[in-house]
Amino acid sequence: MRFRREGSLFIFIQPKALMTTTNTGTTPDRQIELDALFADLDQEFAITRRVLERYPEGHADWKPHEKSMSLGELAAHVANLPHFGKRIAESPEFDFATTPYAPPTARTRAEILDLFDERSAAARKAVGSLGADAMLTDWTLRVGEKIIATATRAQQLRRLMLSHIIHHRGQLTVYYRLLHVPVPSVYGPSADERI
């Protein structure tokens, strides 16, 4: 696999790369292999599901600190985050002013896993349906007139869906450790699980 860096975005170039066109025609410097760009999506979803499978019943209201989300809120948030990827894939922007965030109500392990399974399958399908032109089109997150972030869909999917999931999944493993719940291996062995 070959790639080159363009700002904070890595452009992957492979023999079967998809080409985008501009008003000057096909431009090799905008080649992008969508499968390579998100090759780890299924792996990250599988790791996230494995972490959510450890969700301990009976601790939904537990917080490590008064300013923290509860365990139930955090786990439901992680389970719901793939939905952001679907929104990024299917619309040119998202406006919190017109669609305020409504936290999911899942509280049991079964509800959290069902939510994650539904959201991750829908996100994978939506992301998989995007072509190179759509991936390189700008996508905006806003609150009314205030723009929070504008970047290509590819960048926003990486940041607002995948990196966001990974960030909160890491928090969830800390909650588990504090509750003496065995932490699963993620990228390597944990103190509780060898690979």
Image (tube, rainbow, N blue to C red):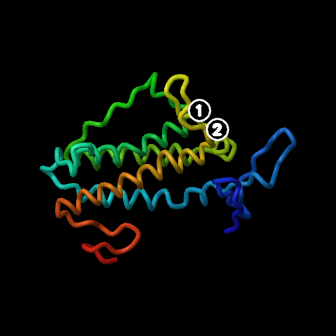
Q: Residue furthest front?
A: 66
Image coordinates of residue 4 in percent, x first then y, are 71, 62
Q: Is residue 195 left or right of residue 6?
A: left
The residue under the point 22% across, 66% down is 182
Q: Label 2, on which residue? A: 138
Image coordinates of residue 98 in percent, x first then y, are 46, 22
Q: Are there few (<14), some (14-19), or many (20+) residues within 10 Å of tag 2?
A: some
Q: What is the secondary structure assignment of the residue under circle 1?
A: loop
Quadrant the C terminus occupies: bottom left
The residue under the point 47% across, 45% down is 123
Q: Are there few (<14), some (14-19), or many (20+) residues within 10 Å of tag 1?
A: some
In the image, what residue type sits under mark 1?
Pro
- Mark 1 touches mark 2? (CB < 8 Å): yes
Q: Is residue 19 left or right of residue 75?
A: right
Of callouts 1 and 2, which one flags the residue occurring earlier in the amino acid sequence?
1
Quadrant the N terminus occupies: bottom right
- Mark pair 1, 2: CA separation: 7 Å
Residue 92 is tagged as 1
Quarter holding residue 153: top right
Image coordinates of residue 57 in percent, x first then y, are 15, 52
Q: Residue furthest left?
A: 58
Residue 91, compared with residue 168, is above or below; it is above
The residue under the point 87% across, 42% down is 24
Quarter holding residue 6: bottom right
